[in-house]
Amino acid sequence: MINDDKIRAFMKRSGWDQLSEEELVDVVSKELDGLIEQGLIERLVGEDGEFYYRTTKQARQQRKPF
């Protein structure tokens, strides 16, 4: 299970903790786009107009950790 401590630790290891909010949004968007291009996640648009992401069947079969 992912929790706040794991997220903070990842951000520190990756250097993301040093980014501004705008820079962080850009980096995360690029990472999500890369996962979409690899066929590991798909982007959905909710009724509220927000974007949501879910793993694809391909990713679940490969059991690739994120």
Image (cartoon, grey):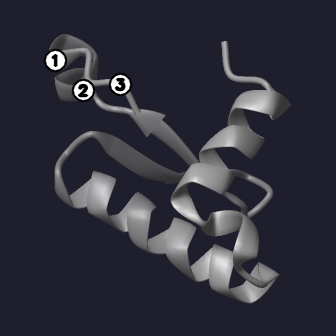
| Residue 48 screen position, x and y as percent | 80, 57
Q: For the residue labelled by badge 3, is the local secondary structure a helix, a strand or a loop?
A: loop
Q: Name the amino acid, label 2.
A: Ala
Q: CA distance from mark 3 to mark 1?
A: 9 Å
Depth check: give the residue in front, 14 or 41: 14
Q: Name the amino acid, label 1.
A: Gln
**1 and 2 marks in contact (CB < 8 Å):** yes
Image disc number at residue 59 = 2
Image disc number at residue 65 = 3
Q: Above or below — where is 17 with respect to 44?
A: below
Q: Name the amino acid, label 3.
A: Pro
Q: Residue visible at 52% across and 74% down? A: 27
Residue linked to disc 1: 62
Depth check: give the residue in front, 24 or 46: 24
Horizontally, is 48 left or right of 63 in the view?
A: right
Q: For the residue labelled by badge 1, is the local secondary structure a helix, a strand or a loop?
A: helix
Please identify the quarter of the rendering in which residue 21 is found: bottom right
**3 and 1 marks in contact (CB < 8 Å):** no
| Residue 49 screen position, x and y as percent | 73, 64
Q: For the residue labelled by badge 2, is the local secondary structure a helix, a strand or a loop?
A: helix
Looking at marks 3 and 2 on the same chain, the residue that comes earlier in the sequence is marked by 2
- Viewport quadrant of the N terminus: top right
Q: CA distance from mark 1 to mark 2?
A: 5 Å
Closer to the camera: disc 3 or disc 1?
3
Q: Residue visible at 66% across and 75% down? A: 24
Q: Is residue 14 visible?
A: yes
